[in-house]
């Protein structure tokens, strides 16, 4: 999530009011995950898609997935538990 937050902040800082932000503005690793994720309208859906994509990309290895997301492994465990609870 930290990586996603940094990308959003960078896009806002580098963007202009005249040009909307689209998929071509995203870094390749985020654009690939975004293309595979369903269209999201809220942060919770975006977070879930990013977590699931990272876990899948790392072959289920949660340590590598947490590192890829830029969060602690314990945070990933808590987020996964929350997703299961909400399902």
Image (tube, rainbow, N blue to C red):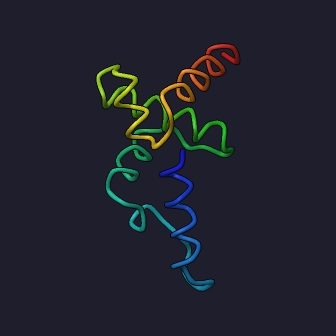
Give how far across and how far down residue 31 sits, in percent: 38, 53
Give how far across and how far down residue 86 sits, in percent: 70, 18
Tell which of 4 and 43 is nearer to you: 4
Residue at 53%, 27% in the rendered image: 76
Q: Is residue 85 left or right of residue 48?
A: right
Give how far across and how far down residue 67 sits, in percent: 39, 37
Residue at 53%, 49% in the rendered image: 2
User: In the image, is residue 72 above or below residue 18?
Assistant: above
In this rendering, the count of numbered labels is: 0
Q: In which quarter of the image is residue 33?
A: top left
User: In the image, is residue 49 above or below residue 62?
Assistant: below
Tell which of 54 and 69 is nearer to you: 69
Residue at 57%, 84% in the rendered image: 16
Q: In this view, does 65 lie to the left or right of 80?
A: left
Give how far across and how far down residue 70 sits, in percent: 46, 43
Tell which of 26 and 23 is nearer to you: 26
Residue at 52%, 59% in the rendered image: 6
Q: In which quarter of the image is the C terminus?
A: top right
Q: In which quarter of the image is the N terminus?
A: top right
User: In the image, is residue 31 above or below residue 16?
Assistant: above
């Amino acid at each position: 999530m930290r990586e996603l937050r940094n990308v959003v902040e960078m896009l806002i800082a580098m963007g202009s009011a005249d040009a909307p932000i689209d998929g071509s503005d995203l870094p390749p690793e985020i654009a690939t995950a975004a293309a595979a994720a369903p269209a999201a309208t809220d942060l919770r859906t975006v977070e879930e898609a990013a977590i699931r994509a990272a876990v899948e990309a790392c072959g289920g290895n949660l340590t590598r997935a947490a590192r890829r997301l830029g969060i602690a492994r314990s945070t990933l465990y808590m987020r996964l538990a929350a997703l299961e609870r909400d399902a």
